[in-house]
C-alpha cells in the first residue's frame, strides 16, 4: 500500500468526521432542530473517503441527496455545512439549499442533488471543461443504485466514453432505491458489468473497505488524468439508517440488517492499522476526540448563527435581471 | 377491504386511496405504477401491511387486494415508466402513474410534452390516451427548490393535457375518479401539506366533474380565487375578512385545464373585484392568465385592478424563514383584498 502516515491519518479523520457529523445530524433532526428531509451517509463513509483521497483539490465531484459525506471528504467546512442544514445565513448556500442541495463550488463540490440521476450529466460537463481548458482535473460522480436505472446515467456513461471525458462514475450500491431492493430494480447483480456496454473499465469493490475503494479510485483517476477516459466503479455498501430520517425501514430484511450491522469501515480500519503497528489505539482515539469536538463546534456554530433575511428569497436567481 | 357506503370524515390520502380502490375493482384495465407505491417489492416479509404504499401512503394496501401484476413498483426511471403508462394507455389499458414530486417532471418531460399530450392530435384523432398522472405539488415541507414546486401552469400550457388540483377530501375522491375515467391524459396535482387534511367524503361511487369550479363560499364584495391549498387560504382569509365587514366570495378552481371561465366571470360580475391566490411562479402563470382572461372578457365589471397573491419569480428556498416569506398565506390574501377593496374604479 502506497499510503503515507499522513494520508492514513487524514482518511481516518475523514471517516470519523463523517460518522460523527451524521450521528449528530440524526440527533438534532430527532429533536426537531433541522427542517425538511435529511438522508444520512452512515455505513458508506469509506466510499467518499476512499475516492476523494485519490483526488486533488481542483478536481470536482457531483453528489446525491445523501451528500454530507461527500462534502466532508472533499474538504467542505463543517461549520458552514451544519449551518446550511439548519437553514442559517452562514450556511454554505446561505440557507437556500439545505441538506439536499448542499454545495461548495469553490471546493469542487458541485452539489448534493434532489434529483436521482441529476449528477452524471453534470459530471460530463465538468469533464468537458477539464478537456477544453486543459486543466487536467477529473470529476468523480457519486450516485446510488437507484440512479443506475435513470436514463441520465446511461446517456452520461456513453457520452463520457465517446468524448473520452475524465469522469469516474462511482456507483454507491447500498441495496435499496428508497424502499425498493436493487434485486428488484436492477436486472443484473453487478452494476459495474454495464461498463462493458460503454466500452469502459468497470470494477466492483467492497465499499466498506476504504483501502480497496482508494486503490480502485487511484487507478481510475490515473486513467482519466492521462486522457484515457471514464471508468465505472461500483462500491457495494450498506445504508445503516433509513432512506431519510423518520423512515421506519420495514422493507429491510433480516439478512440485510445483520450483514449491514457487521460492516463497519471505521472499525476495520482501526483493526488493520493497529495490527500493522502503523498507529496505536490511543493515536486513533485522539483523532476521534478531535473529530467529535469539531462536529460539536459545527453544531454550536449552526445553532448560534443568524437566520437569513427575507430579501434572500429573490436574490441569486440570476446574475442580472432588470 | 370494505369501502363505506355512507359519507364519513376521512383524510385526503384515504379519499384518494378509496377512489383508486373502487375504480380498480370496477375496471380490470386499470393498473397503477410508481416508485415504492407497493413498497418492498420482492421482500417476503412485506406481503402484509408494512409496505410503504408510496411515500405518502396513498396507495397503501392496494397491492394486497390487486396483486403485483396491477400494482407495480418501478425503478427510479421516470422517463421509462411515465412513458410506459402513456404507451399502455394508447394500447388499451387505463393506467394511473405516480410521479412522486412534480419536479421530477424534469426526468420524464418528453413522455408528457411530446408523446402523451400529442399522440391523439398527431394521429388525427386515432389514438386515445386515458392515463392519470398523480403528482405532488407545493411547499411547506422545507423540501427546497426541487421538491416543493407548483407546476400546474407548466402542465396546463401543454395542449392535450387536463390538469386537476383538489382542495378537500371529497373533491380529491370525486376528481380522481373522474380523472381515471377520463379518456384524455390528466395530471392530478396533490398538495404535499394536505394529505392528512380531513373532510366529509361520500361513500361508494363519487364523481366530481373535471372543468367545473366550485363556489366554496358565496359572498358579494370581492371574489377570492384559489386552487388546491390556495383555495383553503382563500377560505381562511374570507373568515377573517367577514369579521371586518368584507363579504368575500371564494371560488375553488378545482381544475386548471380546462378552465371554468364562466364560473369566474359570473362571480366577478356579481362582486366587481377579484383577488387570485396562486402558489405557482407568476410569469406566464395561472394568476396572470386568469387576470388576462377577466380583463379580456369581464373588464366592464371590474371596479378595481385584479389583485394577485403568488409566489415570487424565484425557486423555493429551503430555510423555513425564507420559505414562509415565499409562500402565499391567508394574511397575504387579507392584505391584498383590503388593497383591492380600497381602490375605486
Image (spheres, coloured by chain):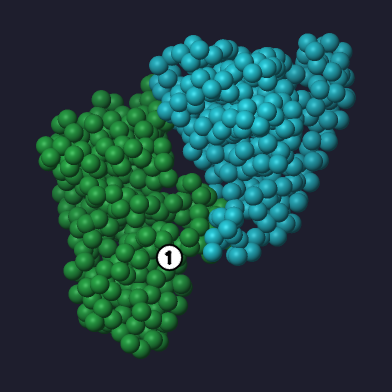
Chain colours: A cyan, B green
Q: Which residue is mark 1?
A: B310
Split into 4 quadrants, where in the image is the C terminus of chain B? Answer: bottom left
Q: Numbered disc 1: what chain?
A: B
In the rendered image, residue A286, in percent from the top left (x then y), is placed at: 86, 30
Which quarter of the picture shows residue A6? Answer: top right
* Drawn side of residue B195 relative to residue B130, left or right: right
* Drawn side of residue B274 relative to residue A65, left or right: left
Split into 4 quadrants, where in the image is the N terminus of chain B? Answer: top left
In the rendered image, residue A199, in percent from the top left (x then y), is placed at: 50, 12
Give the SS element for disc 1. Answer: strand
Q: Of A260 and A199, which appears nearest the observer?
A: A199
- Is A322 rendered above or below residue B77? below
* Residue drawn where x is 79% and y is 46% of the image: A297
Q: How many marks?
A: 1
* Residue drawn where x is 74% and y is 36% of the image: A75
Which quarter of the picture shows residue A60? Answer: top right
Mark 1 neighbour density, 10 Å: few (under 14) some (14–19) many (20 or more) = many
* Residue drawn where x is 74% and y is 46% of the image: A79
In the rendered image, residue B184, in percent from the top left (x then y), is placed at: 19, 44
* Residue drawn where x is 30% and y is 84% of the image: B303
- Is A237 rendered above or below residue A42? above
Res A218 seen here: yes
* Drawn side of residue A197 relative to residue B223, left or right: right
In the rendered image, residue B102, in percent from the top left (x then y), is placed at: 39, 46
Q: Of A126 and B132, which appears nearest the observer?
A: A126
Extreme residue toward the bottom, this view: B344
Amino acid at each position: 500500500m502506497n499510503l503515507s502516515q499522513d494520508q492514513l491519518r487524514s482518511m481516518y479523520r475523514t471517516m470519523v468526521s463523517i460518522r460523527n457529523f451524521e450521528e449528530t445530524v440524526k440527533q438534532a433532526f430527532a429533536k426537531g432542530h433541522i427542517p425538511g428531509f435529511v438522508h444520512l451517509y452512515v455505513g458508506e463513509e469509506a466510499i467518499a473517503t476512499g475516492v476523494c483521497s485519490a483526488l486533488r483539490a481542483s478536481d470536482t465531484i457531483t453528489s446525491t441527496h445523501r451528500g454530507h459525506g461527500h462534502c466532508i471528504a472533499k474538504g467542505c467546512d463543517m461549520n458552514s455545512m451544519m449551518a446550511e442544514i439548519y437553514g442559517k445565513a452562514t450556511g454554505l448556500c446561505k440557507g437556500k439549499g439545505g441538506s439536499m442541495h448542499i454545495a461548495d463550488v469553490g471546493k469542487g463540490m458541485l452539489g448534493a442533488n434532489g434529483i436521482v440521476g441529476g449528477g452524471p450529466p453534470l459530471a460530463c460537463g465538468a469533464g468537458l471543461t477539464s478537456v477544453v481548458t486543459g486543466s487536467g482535473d477529473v470529476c468523480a460522480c457519486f450516485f446510488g443504485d437507484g440512479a443506475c436505472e435513470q436514463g441520465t446515467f446511461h446517456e452520461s456513461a456513453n457520452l463520457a466514453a465517446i468524448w473520452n471525458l475524465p469522469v469516474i462514475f462511482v456507483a454507491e450500491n447500498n441495496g435499496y432505491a428508497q424502499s425498493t431492493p436493487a434485486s428488484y430494480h436492477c436486472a443484473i447483480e453487478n452494476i459495474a458489468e454495464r461498463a462493458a456496454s460503454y466500452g469502459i473499465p468497470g470494477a466492483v469493490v467492497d465499499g466498506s473497505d476504504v483501502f480497496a475503494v482508494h486503490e480502485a479510485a487511484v487507478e481510475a483517476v490515473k486513467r482519466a488524468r492521462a486522457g484515457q477516459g471514464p471508468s465505472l466503479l461500483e462500491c457495494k455498501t450498506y445504508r445503516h439508517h433509513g432512506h431519510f430520517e423518520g423512515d421506519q425501514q420495514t422493507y429491510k430484511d433480516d439478512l440485510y440488517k445483520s450483514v449491514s450491522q457487521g460492516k463497519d469501515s471505521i472499525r476495520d480500519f482501526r483493526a488493520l492499522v493497529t495490527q500493522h503497528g502503523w498507529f496505536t489505539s490511543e493515536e486513533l482515539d485522539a483523532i476521534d476526540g478531535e473529530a467529535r469536538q469539531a462536529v460539536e463546534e459545527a453544531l454550536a456554530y449552526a445553532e448560534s448563527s443568524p437566520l437569513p433575511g427575507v430579501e434572500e428569497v429573490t436574490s441569486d436567481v440570476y446574475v442580472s435581471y432588470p | 377491504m370494505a369501502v363505506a357506503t355512507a359519507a364519513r370524515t376521512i383524510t385526503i390520502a384515504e379519499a384518494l386511496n378509496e377512489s383508486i380502490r373502487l375504480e380498480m375493482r370496477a375496471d380490470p384495465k386499470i393498473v397503477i405504477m410508481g416508485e415504492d407505491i407497493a413498497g418492498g417489492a420482492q421482500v417476503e416479509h412485506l406481503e402484509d401491511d408494512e409496505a410503504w404504499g408510496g411515500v405518502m401512503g396513498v396507495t397503501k394496501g392496494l397491492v394486497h387486494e390487486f396483486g403485483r401484476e396491477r400494482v407495480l413498483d418501478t425503478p427510479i426511471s421516470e422517463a421509462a415508466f411515465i412513458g410506459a403508462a402513456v404507451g399502455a394507455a394508447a394500447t388499451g389499458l387505463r393506467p394511473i402513474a405516480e410521479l412522486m414530486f412534480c419536479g421530477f417532471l424534469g426526468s420524464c418531460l418528453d413522455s408528457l410534452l411530446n408523446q402523451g399530450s400529442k399522440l391523439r392530435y398527431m394521429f388525427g384523432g386515432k389514438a386515445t390516451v386515458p392515463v392519470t398522472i398523480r403528482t405532488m405539488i407545493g411547499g411547506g415541507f422545507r423540501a427546497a427548490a426541487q421538491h416543493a414546486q407548483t407546476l400546474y401552469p407548466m402542465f396546463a400550457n401543454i395542449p392535450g393535457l387536463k390538469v386537476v388540483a383538489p382542495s378537500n377530501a371529497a373533491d380529491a375522491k370525486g376528481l380522481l375518479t373522474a380523472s381515471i375515467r377520463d379518456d384524455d391524459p390528466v395530471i392530478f396535482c396533490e398538495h404535499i401539506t394536505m394529505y392528512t387534511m380531513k373532510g366529509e367524503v361520500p361513500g361508494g361511487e363519487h364523481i366530481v366533474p373535471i372543468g367545473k369550479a366550485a363556489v366554496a363560499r358565496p359572498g358579494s364584495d370581492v371574489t377570492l380565487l384559489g386552487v388546491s391549498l390556495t383555495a383553503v387560504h382563500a377560505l381562511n382569509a374570507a373568515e377573517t375578512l367577514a369579521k371586518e365587514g368584507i363579504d368575500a366570495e371564494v371560488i375553488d378552481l378545482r381544475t386548471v385545464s380546462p378552465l371554468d371561465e364562466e364560473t369566474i366571470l359570473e362571480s366577478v360580475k356579481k362582486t366587481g373585484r377579484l383577488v387570485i391566490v396562486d402558489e405557482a411562479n407568476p410569469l406566464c402563470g395561472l394568476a396572470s392568465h386568469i387576470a388576462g382572461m377577466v380583463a379580456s372578457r369581464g373588464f366592464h365589471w371590474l371596479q378595481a385592478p385584479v389583485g394577485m397573491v403568488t409566489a415570487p419569480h424565484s425557486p423555493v428556498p429551503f430555510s423555513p424563514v425564507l420559505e414562509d416569506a415565499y409562500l402565499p398565506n391567508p394574511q397575504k390574501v387579507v392584505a391584498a383584498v383590503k388593497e383591492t377593496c380600497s381602490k375605486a374604479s
